[in-house]
Image (spheres, rainbow, N blue to C red):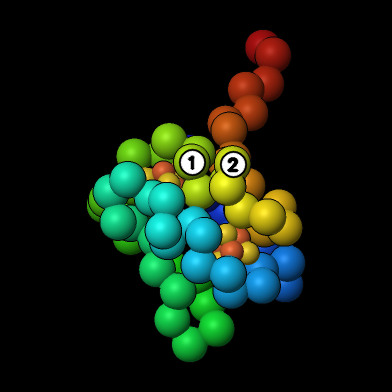
Amino acid sequence: MIPDIKIGLCVMCGKCEEVCPTDAIHLSSGFVYIETDFCEECGICAANCPTGAIAIKFPVFERA
Ligand code: SF4
Ligand code: SF4
C-alpha cells in the first residue's frame, strides 16, 4: 500500500527522500509528498523514518 504520512510527527529530516529507491518521496514547503505513480510500496521510507511518521497501510479483509 502507498505510505501514509502523519505530518504532525514529521521533523523534516529528509531521510525518507534520501532512501527512496524510486525517488517517489519529496519534502517541500513543510509537507512530504509521494508521487504515487513512482512508489513501489517497498516500505523503505517507513522503516527509515526516525519518528514513525510514515505508515504503510495494508488492506483489511473482512471475513464473509
Ligand atoms: S514505499 Fe518505497 S517506493 Fe514508496 S515512497 Fe516509500 S521508499 Fe519510496
Ligand atoms: S523520514 Fe520521517 S521525519 Fe524524516 S522527513 Fe521523512 S516523514 Fe519526516
Nearest the viewer among 20 and 3 is 20
Q: Residues within 10 Å of mark 1 (few under 14, many from 20)?
A: some
Mark 1 vs ligand 1: CB under 8 Å?
yes
Nearest the viewer among 13 and 34 is 13
Residue to which mark 2 is pinned: 47
- Left or right of 53 on screen, residue 18: left
Under circle 2, the secondary element is helix
Residue placed at 55% from the left, 83% from the top?
30
Above or below residue 12? Residue 53 is above
Residue type, label 1: Ile
Residue placed at 66% from the left, 72% from the top?
11
Residue 18's spot in the image, x, y percent?
Answer: 41, 58
Q: Give the total number of marks visible in the rendering.
A: 2
Q: Quadrant of the C terminus?
A: top right
Residue type, label 2: Ala
* Whole-number angstrom distance, CA of label 1 to CA of label 2: 5 Å
**Do labels 1 and 2 touch, CB within 8 Å?**
yes
Q: Residues within 10 Å of mark 2 (few under 14, many from 20)?
A: some
Residue to which mark 1 is pinned: 44
